[in-house]
Image (cartoon, rainbow, N blue to C red):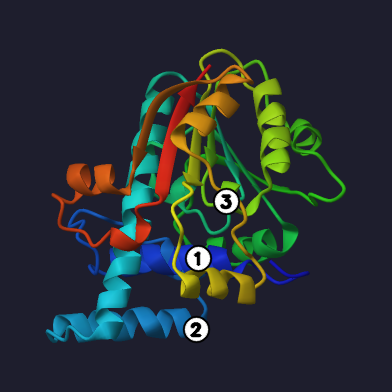
């Protein structure tokens, strides 16, 4: 992201969730009414236009692209939701969302009732989000917004200041962030996470493999000032997590989620490089 402007990538993810919520994905049970609250006027018009065209039976390029976006973001969202539910059921009473963007889980997941939720993000994106959440139904989670200037502050420092309890099990969501970090920066953040993770904590890491992404997708992220710069194999990710005391319980990818959640019907060819590792301490 650039300067004091909210992250365009975070908006893109909210747009994908809104498309899925509008019925454009192959996930018939997908619901995320929070997503549309975070859209720009252009994004809101795009969802309405796509939904209308789909309802009229149109199947041109724009509708196909909207459905792919809805499938990719929708599947990733549901896969992470499931891991969060399991972590909370296992006893985690804290949830830390790193690079929270326009995440809506604290407002849409009843399982988070009474859970202390820490949303960590750049002040520009977080400020825009905070100006919008007032229109959502009140959350039953205990939400703390934790702004961080990554050039001047450490994750450990800001979470300590926000009241995160390092001796209580925590569920960590690291969604849509690792691919924008160098390996050194990723490992440094992992060390901070490990230092605040009591036994029984869960870390959910979304990452990309080394499979080459399309030229135009890469160009788009560079043009908006948020280039994707790192990739990991499942073995490399497991080793990095193991080095700080996390053992991988499951590592799955877009093809797996499609089979489990969408009956293999989703259009995921453009997203097979997306993976999620779920690790425990």
Can residue 203 be seen in the rendering of this structure? Answer: no
Question: What SS does tag 3 mark?
Answer: helix
Residue depicted at 50% across the width and 65% down the height: 135
Q: Is residue 82 above or below residue 11?
A: above
Please give the residue where the numbered disc 3 appears in the rendered image: 179
Please give the residue where the numbered disc 2 appears in the rendered image: 41
Can residue 29 be seen in the rendering of this structure? Answer: yes
> Relative to residue 21, is residue 228 drawn left or right?
right
Q: Measuring from the top left, give residue 125's x and y in whole percent.
A: 66, 63
Please give the residue where the numbered disc 1 appears in the rendered image: 135
> Relative to residue 82, is residue 281 drawn left or right?
right
Q: How crowded is mark 2: few (under 14 residues within 10 Å), some or many (20 or more)?
A: few
Question: What SS does tag 2 mark?
Answer: helix
Q: What mark, if any, has residue 75 been given in the picture?
A: none
Mark pair 3, 1: CA separation: 32 Å
Q: Measuring from the top left, give residue 14's x and y in whole percent.
A: 46, 64
Q: Count the marks: how many?
A: 3
**Displayed quadrant of residue 132:** bottom right
* Earlier-in-chain disc, 2 versus 3: 2
Residue toward you, 24 or 85: 24
Most extreme residue toward the right is: 152
* Earlier-in-chain disc, 2 versus 1: 2
């Amino acid at each position: 992201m650039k300067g004091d402007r909210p992250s365009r990538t975070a908006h893109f993810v909210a747009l994908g969730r809104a498309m899925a919520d509008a019925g454009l994905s192959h996930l018939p049970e997908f619901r995320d009414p929070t997503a549309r609250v975070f859209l720009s006027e252009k994004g809101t018009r795009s969802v309405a236009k796509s939904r209308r065209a789909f309802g009229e039976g149109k199947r041109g390029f724009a509708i196909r692209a909207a459905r792919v976006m809805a499938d990719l973001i929708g599947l990733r969202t549901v896969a992470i939701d499931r891991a969060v539910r399991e972590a909370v059921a296992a006893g985690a009473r804290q949830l830390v969302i790193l690079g929270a963007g326009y995440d809506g889980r604290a407002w849409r997941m009843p399982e988070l009732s009474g859970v202390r939720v820490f949303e960590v993000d750049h002040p520009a994106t977080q400020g825009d989000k905070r100006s919008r959440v007032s229109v959502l139904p009140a959350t039953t989670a205990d939400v703390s917004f934790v702004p961080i200037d990554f050039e001047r502050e450490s994750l450990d420092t800001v979470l300590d200041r926000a009241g995160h309890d390092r001796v209580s099990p925590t569920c960590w969501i690291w969604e849509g962030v690792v691919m924008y970090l160098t390996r050194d920066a990723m490992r440094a953040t992992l060390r901070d996470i490990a230092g605040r993770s009591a036994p029984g904590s869960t870390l959910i890491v979304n990452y990309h493999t080394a499979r080459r992404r399309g030229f135009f997708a890469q160009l788009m992220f560079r043009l908006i000032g948020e280039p994707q710069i790192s990739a990991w194999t499942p073995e490399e990710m497991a080793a990095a997590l193991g080095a700080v005391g996390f053992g991988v319980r499951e590592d799955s990818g877009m093809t797996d989620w499609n089979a489990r959640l969408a009956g293999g019907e989703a259009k995921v060819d453009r997203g097979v490089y997306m993976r999620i590792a779920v690790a425990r301490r």
